[in-house]
Image (cartoon, rainbow, N blue to C red):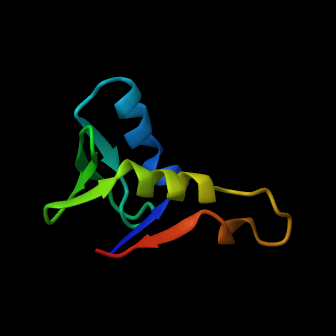
């Protein structure tokens, strides 16, 4: 299982826009960094897992809402493979 937030997947979108084939992401909420493959279909994660751009966009859209009481509760999405 990978734990992703919109903050930690932002480099994948930046790499896609810059036509790069790799990006450095955190798949565990910032504890470690991992180089992933960026391709037309999505992002290649460890274990030969492909996370499609549609799923990444859902994480991005979940995003970080500025809510005074609990801002850290927003934008965390678990993606189970």
Q: Position of residue 76 (x, y in %)?
A: 55, 68
Q: Is residue 22 left or right of residue 65?
A: left
Q: Is residue 68 left or right of residue 77?
A: right
Q: Is residue 45 above or below residue 12?
A: below
Q: Is residue 70 above or below residue 6?
A: below
Q: Position of residue 75 (x, y in %)?
A: 60, 62
> Residue at 35% across / 32% down in the picture?
15
Q: Position of residue 46 (x, y in %)?
A: 18, 61
Q: Nearer the viewer, residue 26 or 74?
A: 74
> Residue at 27% across / 38% down in the picture?
40
Q: Position of residue 53 (x, y in %)?
A: 38, 48
* Residue furthest top in the image: 18
* Image quarter in which the C terminus is found: bottom left
Q: Is residue 15 above or below residue 42?
A: above
* Image quarter in which the N terminus is found: bottom left
| Number of numbered markers | 0
Q: Is residue 22 left or right of residue 62?
A: left
Q: Is residue 42 above or below residue 62?
A: above
> Residue at 36% across / 32% down in the picture?
16
> Residue at 24% across / 48% down in the picture?
36
């Amino acid at each position: 299982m990978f734990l992703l937030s919109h903050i930690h997947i932002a480099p994948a979108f930046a790499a896609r826009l810059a036509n790069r084939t790799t990006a450095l992401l955190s798949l565990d909420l910032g504890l470690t960094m991992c180089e992933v493959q960026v391709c037309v279909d999505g992002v290649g994660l460890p274990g030969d897992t492909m996370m499609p751009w549609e799923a990444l966009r859902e994480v991005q859209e979940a995003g970080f809402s500025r809510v005074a009481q609990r801002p850290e509760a927003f934008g965390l999405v678990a993606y189970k493979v």
